[in-house]
Amino acid sequence: MTAWGWRVPFLFIIRRSLRETDEFLAKKHRWSMGEIARSIGQNWGVMLAAWAW
């Protein structure tokens, strides 16, 4: 963490300064918490594999 952890705040600074794409802003559908939870529940194995890697 000491070797690279100091870089983490810069990721948040960069993310906040980026503009959303026009395609994203044009989308009308915004995912609800229920849809997100359902997707996580259906894909928990994939998420676990990615997290464990």
Image (tube, rainbow, N blue to C red):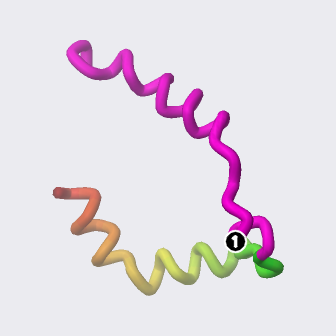
Q: Is residue 53 left or right of residue 7?
A: left
Q: Where is residue 15 in the image (x, y as percent from the top left)?
A: 58, 39
Q: Nearer the viewer, residue 49 or 9?
A: 9
Q: Please state the extent of the stretch shown in magenta in the rendering.
A: 1-26
**Which residue shows up at 44% across the image and 86% down it?**
42
Seen at 47% across and 80% down, the residue is 41
22 or 46, which lies in front? 22
Q: Position of residue 11 (x, y in %)?
A: 48, 32
31 over 6 or under it: above or below: below
Q: In which quarter of the image is residue 34?
A: bottom right
- In this view, the residue farthest toward the front is 22
Q: Position of residue 36 (x, y in %)?
A: 60, 74
- Left or right: 50, with 26 as reference point: left
Is residue 16 positioned above or below 8 on the image?
below
Dot 1: what SS? helix
Quadrant in which the N terminus appears: top left
* Residue displayed at 65% across by 80% down: 35
The stretch drawn in magenta includes residue 51? no
Front residue of this view, candidates 19 and 46: 19
Seen from this angle, which residue lies furthest left? 53
Count every numbered label the image shows and give the total. Answer: 1
Residue at 37% in and 76% down:
44
Q: Mark 1 points at which residue?
A: 23
Q: Position of residue 48 (x, y in %)?
A: 28, 66
Left or right: where 29 falls relative to 41: right
Q: Is the magenta stretch mostly helix, strand or loop?
A: helix
Q: Is residue 13 above or below residue 38?
A: above
* Residue closer to the observer: 25 or 40: 25
Residue type, label 1? Glu
Where residue 23 sits, quadrant-wise, is bottom right
Image quadrant where residue 51 sits: bottom left
Q: In which quarter of the image is the C terminus?
A: bottom left
